[in-house]
Image (cartoon, rainbow, N blue to C red):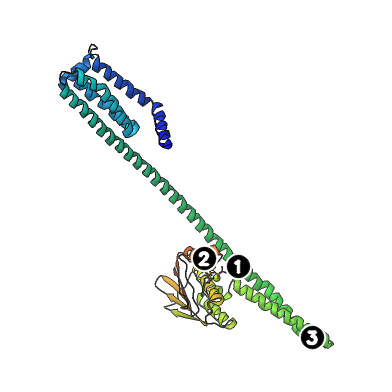
Amino acid sequence: MAATRYSVINWLTSVLRRPGFWFILAILALITLAHYEEALAYPALLSQLTNNLNLDRHAFERILCLAPIVWAGFLFGWRGALITSLAALAAMLPRAIFISPHPLDALFETSAVFVIGNVLAISFASLRKEREYRTQMEVARREQQKIAEELSAMQQNLRYYLQQATRAQEEERKRISHELHDDTIQALVVLSRQLDSLASGEKGLSEENRLRLEELWQQTDNILRGVRRLSQDLRPAALDRLGLLPALEWLASNMTEHSAIEAEVKVIGEERRLSEETAIALFRITQEALRNVWRHSGATKAEMTVEFDKDKARITITDNGKGFRLPEKIGDLAKNGKLGLTGMQERAQLAGGTLTVQSQPDKGTSITVELTV
Ligand SMILES: Nc1ncnc2c1ncn2[C@@H]1O[C@H](COP(=O)(O)OP(=O)(O)OP(=O)(O)O)[C@@H](O)[C@H]1O
Ligand SMILES: [Mg+2]
């Protein structure tokens, strides 16, 4: 109740502050004055107008009241129109009832002004509201469009940045792998051979020293194998020297050799020469998928099917493991720090392709990456 009173008072004070209110009041006062002070003559122009319209002076004044009512409706809504029309009614009625020689006609005209005024005012007010609403909608739509454009530009920039970062990462891996291969591995090979020939060829060596030399040779050999693995992992030599299929064969034999999973590669269609970027994207995605098979699936078999179409290359990696429940979006996994599948999807999209994951508990997993070549 108090809140309603407060809002009415607020509305009234806001109305009183607007010049339009005082104009309407002045016009109403002017019309009322003319309505009762007949001694005040009309300016010639107005008399001519009423004559031309074939209206008597008082009827004309009643019709004139429509103007402030409609204006009030336009400025202050239906409440403004109602109050103004009530004020006009209060001003016109005494004359219609007590002074007019045709009270019935006068009463009819006054009531008609009241009704028509309100109807017109409310129609104008709702028209204005609708126009305001449409303008607001248009502004909101433009804002939305602007935000969408900005977002799309940001997305493009981010994608470009990711593409460059991925390229730089691959280049760096390649460089480190080559350096390991050309320098570190060669030096370790020489060291290993020297230790081997020392241990087996040197005559005056005590048994104890020979055993220590052999141990050193073994350690060097282990380091050598570790560095070779690291170099291969960073950038399989087969990928650069022989292409995608031998690199995938290497992945499969590596897996079969070091785990209880039997992995194999199948090829459908005629092998195509792929760009370095496409080949590396396909290889990295397959590598990550196999890593998941090894870590999570408990499978005994993994299969990589490579398909070459007219303009597409597709690899499907399937396993016969325990599968898993897929989230609604692959990206949701990243929130829990699981970045493998999200990274694979991102990588496929960066290369202009798609990644599809199919999995169900106890039904194995199948991941397909498809790129345009
Ligand atoms: N071949 C699979 N078999 C069974 N479950 C899998 C397989 N691949 C993925 N998953 C399930 O999907 C989850 C998400 O895999 P994802 O590669 O995104 O993350 P992660 O392997 O757990 O961690 P990260 O790859 O970041 O080291 C895994 O935790 C696992 O539960
Ligand atoms: Mg993973």
Tags 3 and 1 touching, CB below 8 Å: no
Asked if residue 15 is positioned above or below residue 362 in the image, the reply reads above
The label shown at residue 173 is 1
Total number of numbered discs in the rendering: 3
* Residue displayed at 31% across by 32% down: 73
Asked if residue 182 is positioned above or below residue 145 in the image, the reply reads below
**Mark 1: which secondary structure?**
helix
Pick the residue in front: 257 or 301: 301
The image shows residue 340 at horizontal and vertical percentages of: 54, 68
Pick the residue in front: 91 or 259: 91
What residue is pinned by disc 2?
333
> Of the residues shown, which amino acid type is indicated by label 1?
Arg
Q: Quadrant of residue 371?
A: bottom left
Question: Is label 2's Cβ within 8 Å of ligand 1?
Answer: yes
What residue is pinned by disc 3?
211
Q: Is residue 119 left or right of residue 274?
A: left
> Of the residues shown, which amino acid type is indicated by label 3?
Leu
Q: Earlier in the sequence, mark 2 or mark 3?
A: 3
**Mark 3: which secondary structure?**
helix
Q: Is residue 172 left or right of residue 50?
A: right
Tags 2 and 1 touching, CB below 8 Å: no
The image shows residue 51 at horizontal and vertical percentages of: 16, 18
* Residue displayed at 43% across by 75% down: 308
Q: CA distance from mark 3 to mark 1?
A: 38 Å
Q: CA distance from mark 2 to mark 1?
A: 26 Å
